[in-house]
Image (cartoon, rainbow, N blue to C red):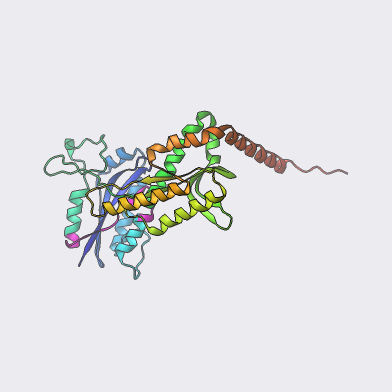
Amino acid sequence: MVSRYSIIQYVPNPITDERINIGVVAFTDHDVRVQFLVNWERVHNFGMENIDFLKDFAERMKETASRGLVFPGDEESEIPKHERLTKIARGWMNSIQFTEPRPSLAPVDKLLHDIVQDFLVEPHNSLINTDKIYKYKEISINSSIQLLSISTPRNRQQAARVATSSVKEAFKNWLGQENKEQFKTLIKQKYEFDGKREKFEFDVAVANGSPYLLAQGLSFEINPQKNSLKALSWSIENVKKYNQDLPIAVITLPPKEEDSPDYLERQKIYEQSTANYLYLGAEVLQQDQVPDWVEQKLNPMKQKILESVHQTYTLKNSVETLHSTPLQTTN
């Protein structure tokens, strides 16, 4: 019987996408085993925030596993466990992430022991500096201890977080401290653009009534789903048809892991897809190019953007004043 495993990771900051392993789950069709860190000191130092919610999640996972289920909220169904977990791994967008399950021929208890040794590291006196953060790589400390996190390909949902965070951060810096109050009014997540016949959703927009720019994230670190590539092409084509000057960016996570068996296939899909998006009028960016893009596109209309927000505030205040003023009656 094939066993499978997944690494449970804590991702405190989606912009940097640094992650640390906090637990592992091994399972078959019939059995589920989980284990989490005993000492959470490294995790606290890593995220620099209260981590009680992680410990609560660990307890919920243990209770869930005792019922033969693989994640909180999981339910028995005809869909195999690994497919249910794969859907969660690709869809969850919070600070606790599962890697996509991988197969193993080892029995489930042996598999759990092995992945605990490989992926969970407890502080070990002075051998590990708890103030230092390691990310993405297994690093040998000595012959018996390995660190910490593994490099896992990011999916479409993680690309959406990267795109959203990148645009938000770039836009906030572009606005400047003196205009920080306008930020919440103008930045829109999961923005729906009203087309002629249908709506098109983008991960993030700068908008006030009408959009000033739109952006969507895509990952080619895994094989992207063809329907999502086609859907984005359809969205860009239809939005640009009637809004030729509206800036649209596709913020990509390009293929990596050149030694992986599907790298050449992903590279080909990446080149074909990005060429198509460019042809349709979008711009293809990587994360570090977003600040320059935001500045380039918004600089010519900065005064217009700030004036539109001022008008919105003025109108809102006028309406609130009108509603709060008691009606006067005449005899």
**Quarter residue 314 falls in:** top right
Residue 106, given in percent of the width and then of the height, sits at 16, 61
Q: Nearer the viewer, residue 200 or 161?
A: 200
Q: Is residue 251 visible?
A: yes
**Residue drawn at point x = 31 percent, y = 67 percent:** 80
Residue 242, given in percent of the width and then of the height, sits at 57, 49
Residue 176, given in percent of the width and then of the height, sits at 50, 30
Q: How many marks?
A: 0
Question: Which residue lies most toward the top here?
Answer: 178
**Residue drawn at point x = 25 percent, y = 35 percent:** 132
**Quarter residue 307 falls in:** top right
Q: Is residue 98 visible?
A: no
Q: Nearer the viewer, residue 145 or 165?
A: 165
**Residue stretch in magenta:** 90-109
Q: Is residue 232 left or right of residue 306?
A: left
Residue 109, given in percent of the width and then of the height, sits at 18, 60
Question: Which residue lies most toward the left here?
Answer: 143
